[in-house]
Image: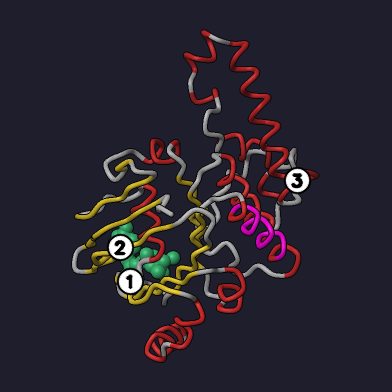
Amino acid sequence: MSAILQVSGLTKRFGGIVVADDITLGLLPGEVVGLIGPNGAGKTSLFNLITGVIKPDAGRIVMDGVRIDGLKLSERAKLGIARTWQHARSFRSLTVLDNLLLGARDYPGDSLLRTLLQPGISRRMDMEAEQRAMLLLERVRLAHKAHDLAAELSYGQQKLLGMARALMSEGACLLLDEPMAAVEGRTYAIMREVIEQEAHRGQAVCIVEHNVGFIRDLCSRGVFMAAGKVLADGPVEELMKMKDLTALYFGAAA
Ligand SMILES: Nc1ncnc2c1ncn2[C@@H]1O[C@H](COP(=O)(O)OP(=O)(O)O)[C@@H](O)[C@H]1O
Ligand SMILES: [Mg+2]
């Protein structure tokens, strides 16, 4: 099976800090990969490089056979890269539903010209996007909050909204940056269910998560990073057995 997303030799320095040091990583359709490692390892930076928030100094990123590392953020999103943010970024003064519509891939609101020239088509696309958004809100159990302001959501609900926003673009590659952090109980279960459903549909999912139990339960593969380097890539059980990695991880996390 060939990778949906293939990163090779990706390197990025900020002054003296190497946040990505010759990273090579492939994500296959239908797999959930756990990206683990101590704080400051470069996990979020890797997502920023893949999505186009920051530019690499060297290396290549290929999505479905297309080289994307020179493309803009929005172009990469159109090709199917979706993400959630470590620190939830919802538009607090907009409704929950409008937060999702902003994330819609072909939402006509972003093209005034198209709206003016083709009002009928735009309205139909509006309705399609809204239907898709409502279905997603049902999946993350927020449909009853659709018309509330995002500011009124609890922390866990904000995380679920972030997840639903990422799914609006229907990307084939989902990068989830600590979606479970400080989330428990029902929210945890909903998040887990959604991630499993996406993988089952063939999306490649990469998830940054510190909860080792969760990684063990959900991820078919683990990638361990420290100081911008991928130190290990393989079955989670095998990573857990690597004494030097656990010492590095728990040593640094403590
Ligand atoms: N825009 C930036 N400018 C300078 N340094 C940065 C920037 N983004 C991240 N870093 C640094 O890169 C390192 C890796 O950070 P990050 O990718 O957030 O790690 P992680 O997500 O694994 O905790 C840290 O030392 C961080 O301070
Ligand atoms: Mg991070």
Q: Amino acid at mark 2?
A: Thr
> For the residue carrying disc 3, how many other residues have a C-alpha within 10 Å: few (<14), some (14-19), or many (20+)?
some
> For the residue carrying disc 1, how many other residues have a C-alpha within 10 Å: few (<14), some (14-19), or many (20+)?
many
Q: Quadrant of the N terminus?
A: bottom left
Q: Residue at x 68, y 43 (%)?
A: 136
**Quarter of the picture for ligand 1?**
bottom left
Q: Which residue is mark 2?
A: 24
Task: Give the vertical position of 226 relative to 143 (above or below).
Answer: below
Q: Mark 1 to mark 2: distance in Å?
A: 8 Å
Task: Give the vertical position of 250 relative to 117 (above or below).
Answer: below
Q: Mark 2 to mark 3: distance in Å?
A: 37 Å
Asked where in the image residue 133 lies, by quadrant, the reply is top right
Q: Amino acid at mark 1?
A: Val
- Residue found at the very far front of the displayed protein: 1
What's the magenta region?
Answer: 189-198
Task: Give the vertical position of 72 relative to 238 (above or below).
Answer: above
Which percent across, then down, holds residue 3?
40, 53
Q: Which residue is mark 3?
A: 138
Q: Earlier in the sequence, mark 1 or mark 2?
A: 2
Q: Residue at x 32, y 56 (%)?
A: 7
Q: Main secondary structure of the magenta part?
A: helix
Q: Amino acid at mark 3?
A: Glu
Image side of residue 148 versus residue 90, left or right = right
Image side of residue 168 versus residue 133, left or right = left
Whether 208 is among the magenta residues is no
Asked where in the image residue 37 lies, by quadrant, the reply is bottom left
